[in-house]
Image (cartoon, helix red, strand yellow):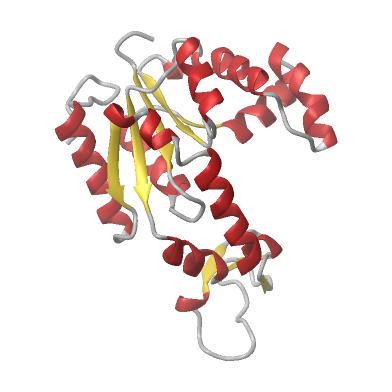
């Protein structure tokens, strides 16, 4: 993995990490690795780590950090990770970050999306999701009125998920601040700090500029990120 462009995405819930990560990975020519997706794939394929993880997943319980690290080791030796990868959703705690470093998989750069608590709350509590196809919406961009319109994609009914209520959002923010936010200091010398409250295209441009200017990052073809 020498010289590979290993990246980690950090940011509070609702900061847009998933969207930025997918677009950034595509731009750089490296795979976007989500631990949830990797766990499901490994379990379906019956890989050694997937076999170990499956009972935890089936029971809906926490998959131990060691298993997640082993999963990453198993995944990043695949050909598409030769030039690097972008981790989204891991590490979430200092012990996880330290374990990642210990296995030689520490990131060369960490993208931190900075979003205020008020903006996170606005984004998440205003989110509506189609109960049929999962298409996301936001009340700020829906017609005013007591009734929600049907999903433009499939015609399904829009719903307000329980985990998007204010009380749950506040708890998620508290969990992030205690468990994950300290990673910004842990990775201080590798952090590219970006204002996540800009327009989506501006956020991606800021990430690219930060990586290019601060770290001289290159894409999978070895070219400087344009």
In this view, the residue in front, 16 or 65, is: 65
Q: Residue at x 39, y 60 (%)?
A: 116
Q: What is the x, y in percent for residue 29?
A: 34, 29
Q: What is the x, y in percent for residue 77?
A: 50, 11
> Is 203 drawn above or below residue 131 in the view shown?
above
Q: Residue at x 58, y 47 (%)?
A: 175
Q: Can residue 116 be seen in the rendering of this structure? A: yes
Q: What is the x, y in percent for residue 53?
A: 74, 23
Tell me if 111 is positioned left or right of 214 in this view: right
Q: Which quadrant holds the N terminus? A: top left
> Is 58 drawn above or below residue 122 in the view shown?
above
Residue 149 falls in image quadrant: bottom right
Tell me if 92 is positioned left or right of 39 in this view: left
In this view, the residue in front, 17 or 102, is: 102
> Is 20 drawn above or below residue 190 in the view shown?
below
In this view, the residue in front, 172 or 47, is: 172
Residue 215 falls in image quadrant: top left
Q: What is the x, y in percent for residue 46?
A: 75, 18
Residue closest to the far bottom? 145
Q: Which quadrant holds the C terminus? A: top left
Tell me if 55 is positioned left or right of 216 in this view: right
Q: Can residue 132 be seen in the rendering of this structure? A: no
Q: How many marks?
A: 0
In this view, the residue in front, 167 or 154, is: 167
Q: Residue at x 38, y 23 (%)?
A: 107
């Amino acid at each position: 993995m020498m010289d590979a462009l290993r990246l980690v995405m950090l940011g509070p819930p609702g900061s847009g990490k998933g969207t930025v990560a997918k677009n950034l990975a595509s731009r750089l020519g490296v795979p976007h690795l989500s631990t949830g997706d990797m766990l499901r794939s490994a379990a379906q394929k019956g890989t050694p780590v997937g076999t170990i993880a499956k009972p935890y997943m089936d029971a809906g319980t926490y998959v131990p950090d060691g298993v997640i690290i082993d999963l990453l080791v198993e995944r990043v030796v695949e050909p598409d990770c030769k030039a690097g990868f972008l981790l989204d959703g891991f590490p979430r705690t200092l012990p996880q970050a330290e374990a990642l470093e210990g296995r030689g998989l520490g990131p060369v750069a960490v993208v931190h999306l900075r979003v205020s608590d008020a903006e996170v709350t606005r984004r998440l509590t205003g989110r509506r999701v189609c109960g049929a196809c999962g298409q996301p919406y936001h009340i700020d961009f829906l017609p005013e009125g007591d009734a929600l319109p049907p999903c433009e994609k499939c015609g399904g009914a829009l719903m307000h998920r329980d985990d998007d209520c204010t009380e749950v959002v506040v708890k998620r923010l508290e969990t992030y601040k205690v468990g994950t936010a300290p990673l910004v200091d842990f990775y201080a010398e590798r952090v590219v700090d970006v204002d996540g409250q800009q327009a989506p295209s501006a956020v991606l441009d800021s990430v690219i500029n930060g990586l290019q200017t601060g770290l001289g990052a290159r894409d999978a073809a070895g070219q400087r990120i344009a």
